[in-house]
Image (cartoon, rainbow, N blue to C red):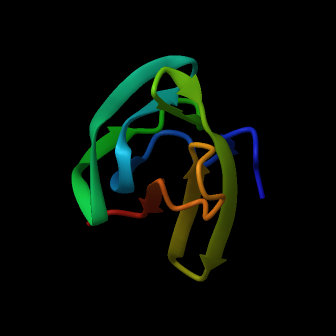
Amino acid sequence: MADDGVFRIPAGIEFGATVLVNSALAQTVKVLVDGEVRATFDGSGIKDKNLGTQVIHSGRGEVRVKVEAGGKPSELLANTISEKNLNVIVIGSEDGSDYDYNDSIVVLNWPLG
């Protein structure tokens, strides 16, 4: 688990980043690679509103996910599944209202193709 939102993934690959939201409060999710913002997702909604998927190059392999709600950083919980060729990191965020950690759900996955 990486509650700080920092993850190591293989260098030099493409990975997917998908964001779902379950909050009326506007969420901003940033995916950084090697310290640079590579994708930003903005929106609000309920019932797993899909803010989209982007394919991102992993650079040197340091990936960080930051989530803000209402201009304030959200708490994060994360879990990793790595089995054979299946690699998935699921990050849940909490914006401080109900402590269900589903206000933004970020899914990182690889390999692609």
- Quick one: 95 or 81, which is closer to the camera? 95
Across and down, in percent, residue 73 comes to: 60, 28
Furthest residue toward bottom: 84
| Front in this rendered view, residue 100 or 91 | 100
Give the residue drawn at x 67%, y 59%.
78
Is residue 56 depicted above or below 38 in this figure? below
Residue depicted at 55% across the width and 63% down the height = 90
Query: What residue lies at 59% left-to-right and 37% top-to-bottom?
Result: 61
Residue 83 position, x and y percent, is 62, 82
Is 52 rendered above or below residue 28? below
Q: Residue furthest front?
A: 97
27 horizontally vs 91: left or right: left
Q: Residue at x 51, y 77 (%)?
A: 86
Instruction: From the viewer's perspective, tell me whether residue 71 is left or right of residue 6.
Output: left
Q: Position of residue 5 (x, y in %)?
A: 66, 40
Q: Nearer the viewer, residue 43 or 15?
A: 43
Which quadrant: the C terminus?
bottom left
Q: Is residue 69 left or right of residue 39?
A: right
Drawn side of residue 111 relative to residue 3, left or right: left
**x and y percentages locating residue 74 in the rendered image:** 61, 37
Q: Where 36 falls versus 16 (above or below)?
A: above
Q: Which quarter of the figure has residue 79?
A: bottom right
